[in-house]
Image (cartoon, rainbow, N blue to C red):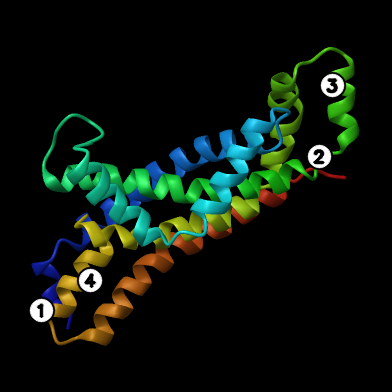
Amino acid sequence: MFDFLQDYDLAGAVWTTVQLAVLSAVGSLIWGTVLAAMRVGPVPLMRGFGTAYVNIVRNIPLTVIILFASLGLNQTLQITLGGGGDFETINFRLAVLGLTLYTSAFVCEALRSGINTVPVGQAEAARAIGLSFGQVLRHVVLPQAFRSSVVPLANVLIALIKNTTVAAAIGVAETALVMKEMIENEAQLLLISAIIALVFVVLTLPTGLFLGWVGKKVAVKR
């Protein structure tokens, strides 16, 4: 029943999916944190940029962003994000960029919800002893915000893992692209769908359970 699987590099495709998710998650956490800092910062221009970015990007379909990264940045502007490589390598980098730009908007909102749980008095007390806005954010607000945002960030990560399937639209050889090839060549639609669904359950369920446990352990007691 499963003999046809040996004709496809499913393990390699799953590994590509994992790499997409991990690299995009790291990039999204960094850029999303910067955006969250902008949105709660004292500079109106930065607040405006952060607000506009989040409201615009999260309302654009991810497929559009991924296709723009490939067709617009690569084919039109000749941006390769690394100075070379074959077609698949370049599109992998661009897929990571697209996923990062998209997911960071949701990371920003998850972190901002965590920032809102920090009592205002703590920030005011920190400013009263002479700390700058950056120091207050770094030493007082963000550590508590991250602890309060573990579960929302876990939901964003799970969504990101599933969103990696969109990278198939630009030829990245991840799980969804291999699934498409198998469905086109094999007359076992239900079995193939069940296998791919199981792959994503294996990737997302333990992640959600682990981060949910971490969230309970590090939650700020009020």
Q: CA distance from mark 3 to mark 1?
A: 63 Å
Residue 32: mark in rendering: none
Q: CA distance from mark 4 to mark 1?
A: 10 Å
Q: Residue 83: which quarter of the image?
A: top left
Q: Residue under circle 1?
A: 185
Q: CA distance from mark 4 to mark 2?
A: 45 Å
Q: Dot 4: what SS?
A: helix
Q: Residue under circle 4?
A: 179
Q: Nearer the viewer, mark 4 or mark 3?
A: 3
The local crowd at label 4, few if under 14, some if 14 to 19, many if 20 or more residues have their Cα within 10 Å, is many
The kind of residue on which mark 4 rests is: Met
Seen in the picture, residue 37 relative to 12 is either above or below; the reply is: above
The local crowd at label 1, few if under 14, some if 14 to 19, many if 20 or more residues have their Cα within 10 Å, is few
Q: Dot 2: what SS?
A: loop
Q: Residue under circle 3?
A: 126
Q: CA distance from mark 4 to mark 3?
A: 54 Å
Q: Earlier in the sequence, mark 3 or mark 1?
A: 3
The kind of residue on which mark 3 rests is: Ala
Q: Dot 1: what SS?
A: helix
The kind of residue on which mark 1 rests is: Asn
Pick the front one: 44 or 36: 44
